[in-house]
Image (spheres, grey):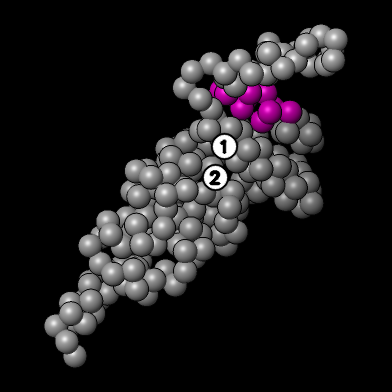
Amino acid sequence: MTKKQGREDDATGQLTRAAVVSAALRVLEDRGLEGLSTRAVADSLGVRMNTVLWHVKTKARMLELMADAVVGEVGYTDLPSPPRHRARELARRYRRALLAHRDGAALVTGTYSAEPHTLRFADRLIGALLEAGADEEQAAWTAWTVIYFLLGLVQEEQAAPDQFDDRLDRAVDAGTYPALHRVAAHMRQDAFEDRFTFGLDAILARLPE
């Protein structure tokens, strides 16, 4: 064994999968999802790319683990007892976890992460919906709807320009798009908190009284 191989073996042994995922999340903050790669993560750790791949196998697998780590930041202490309020609070905490990371929603959207943190969140949300009176099918589909709504809304929020974008206002004239023109003032890329509340209310309103 060469000295170089020995150093790489030492790095592989000292690193953990959790450390690689943490490093990947730091690279995400610095470079965004488009700039994220296993090589960039390896460079940030000062190791070879093969060392990173030894722990996460593929980039796709690394993204799954990152997405699960993001969802793992959802806290479950001090949740409201009434199940409807609990479901609403879980949705709020999920949104905050996504917003806490650059491109967090895009990261989670692009993965199918059947991992412990993701499953725990789904279990808690579905449990609240079942307690609120939903049957099994409605609880499952409502949970999907809540999560898909949040992923879409947060992706838009995280991609929104810092300055006002007037392209929609300029494109929508009353003669060509009369309905859009009437509501154009309500379709601007802002008021995300209000849109979150409105959308979540609309979804949860379908639960049994």
Residue closer to the observer: 190 or 126: 190
**Percent of width and height locating residue 144:** 69, 47
**Percent of width and height locating residue 2:** 17, 87
Res 92 visible? no
Q: Quadrant of residue 111?
A: bottom right
| Residue type, label 1 | Gln
Q: How many marks?
A: 2
Residue closer to the observer: 8 or 173: 173
Give the residue number, with chain letter if any, for mark 1. 155
> In the figure, is residue 70 to the left or right of 105?
left
> In the figure, is residue 111 to the left or right of 148?
left
Q: Quadrant of residue 180?
A: top right
> Which residues fall within the magenta stretch?
192-202
> In the figure, is residue 72 to the left or right of 135?
left
- On residue 206, the disc is none
Looking at the image, the residue that sits furthest to the bottom is: 1
Q: Residues within 10 Å of mark 2 (few under 14, many from 20)?
A: many
Give the residue number, with chain letter if any, for mark 2. 106
